Image (cartoon, rainbow, N blue to C red):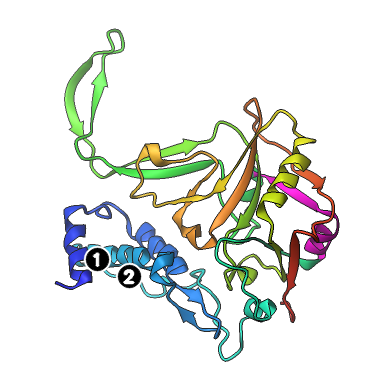
């Protein structure tokens, strides 16, 4: 038995896509392709190495294909149009690769902040930066790589064995017929408050410059020193807020248990390729909307450097 045959057989034992509609199924494929493809140093599209998760994406792609077999379904023409996959540029070298100049910052040794040179030059020189509110990321004007609902996460759990039954208003005892739930049950988990968040990446992805519509990357080479300065700098503005630092956990809404949803650090799996590390500041009391914080950490030239992309779009 080949690997894909094994995966297909396993999927039939747990058919988690059975009740997913056509629109959502095709969106899932777009999300899979967003992560299953990467921009190579040659400017081509390729698959990430297995140790960076390509096996997972190929498996969930196989699950979709098997679901279509089981429902005698198909993809509608043009459903991949506009999918946010990397932009190939072969035979030209990717701008982000050229900006490296042959340097290798080492896996897991640095953090990366992608953005505009006109802002990041000032960040390097004086440490001035903006810490945004989580609610601001729902702005519809933001592009697909940035826009997200950071205050809630929705999962779907199988409705197998779940039923609906009327309750007597006076005794609160169940009465009448039990009606089984057909399909998935949607659960939305919401954070109790808006909060501040500063986002970085744990990897230098060649597609990130284009995805974030930037022309520059701040390479944070001494991560501990930077985080210490950032935490102290923001503490001045929000002295009683709880600060937390950690990697984002990317969750598949169709394969996530309720207890696995992490407030402030759980994100939809379409963003997994971004390898985000974040710092969050949570107010002591629930607050519907918090304001961004502007702070200065002092010069970062001793712990960071800039990679400026030439011929920026």
Q: Are marks 2 and 1 in contact (CB under 8 Å)?
A: yes
Q: Residue furthest top?
A: 170
How far apart are the two marked residues, 2 and 1, measured between alpha carbons? 8 Å
Horizontally, is 194 left or right of 189 in the view? right
Residue 123 is inside the magenta segment: yes
- Determine crowd level at label 2: few under 14, some 14-19, many 20+ residues with C-alpha closer than 10 A: some
* 53 lies above or below 267: below
> Which is nearer the N-term, disc 2 or disc 1?
1
* Residue at image location 74% in from the left, 61% down from the top: 304
Segment colored magenta:
118-133
Report the label total. Answer: 2
Element marked by disc 2: loop
Element marked by disc 1: helix
- Residue 253 seen in the figure: yes
* Residue at image location 81% in from the left, 53% down from the top: 127
Q: Residue furthest left?
A: 1
* 268 lies above or below 29: above
* Residue at image location 58% in from the left, 68% down from the top: 106
Residue 277 is inside the magenta segment: no
Label at residue 149: none
Residue position marked by numbered label 1 in the rendering:
68
Residue 157 percent across, percent down from the top left:
31, 43
- Residue 149 seen in the figure: no
The N terminus, quarter of image:
bottom left
Residue position marked by numbered label 2 in the rendering:
75
């Amino acid at each position: 038995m080949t690997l894909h045959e094994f995966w297909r057989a396993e999927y039939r034992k747990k058919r988690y896509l059975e009740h997913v509609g056509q629109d959502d199924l095709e969106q899932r494929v777009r999300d899979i392709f967003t992560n299953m493809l990467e921009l190579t140093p040659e400017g081509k599209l390729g698959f990430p190495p297995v140790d960076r998760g390509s096996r997972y994406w190929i498996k969930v792609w196989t699950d979709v294909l098997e679901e279509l077999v089981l429902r005698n379904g198909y993809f509608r023409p043009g459903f991949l149009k506009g999918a946010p996959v990397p932009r190939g540029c072969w035979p030209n070298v990717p701008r982000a690769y050229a900006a490296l100049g042959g340097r290798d910052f080492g896996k897991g040794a640095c953090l990366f902040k992608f953005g505009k040179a006109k802002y990041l030059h000032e960040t390097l020189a004086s440490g001035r930066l903006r810490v945004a509110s989580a609610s601001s990321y729902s702005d519809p004007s933001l592009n697909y790589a940035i826009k997200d609902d950071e205050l809630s996460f929705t999962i779907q759990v199988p409705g197998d064995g779940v039923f609906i039954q009327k309750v007597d208003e006076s005794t609160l005892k169940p009465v009448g017929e039990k009606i089984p739930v057909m399909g998935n049950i949607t659960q939305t988990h919401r954070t109790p408050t808006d909060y501040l968040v500063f986002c970085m990446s744990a990897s230098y992805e060649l597609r990130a410059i284009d995805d974030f519509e930037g022309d520059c990357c701040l390479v944070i080479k001494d991560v501990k020193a930077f985080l210490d300065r950032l935490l102290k700098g923001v503490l001045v503005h929000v002295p009683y807020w709880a600060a937390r630092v950690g990697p984002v956990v990317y969750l598949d809404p169709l394969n996530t248990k309720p207890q696995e949803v992490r407030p402030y650090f759980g994100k939809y799996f379409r963003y997994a390729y971004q390898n985000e590390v974040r710092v969050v500041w949570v107010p002591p009391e629930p607050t519907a909307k918090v304001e961004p914080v502007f702070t200065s950490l002092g010069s970062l030239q001793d712990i960071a450097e800039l990679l400026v992309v030439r011929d920026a779009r």
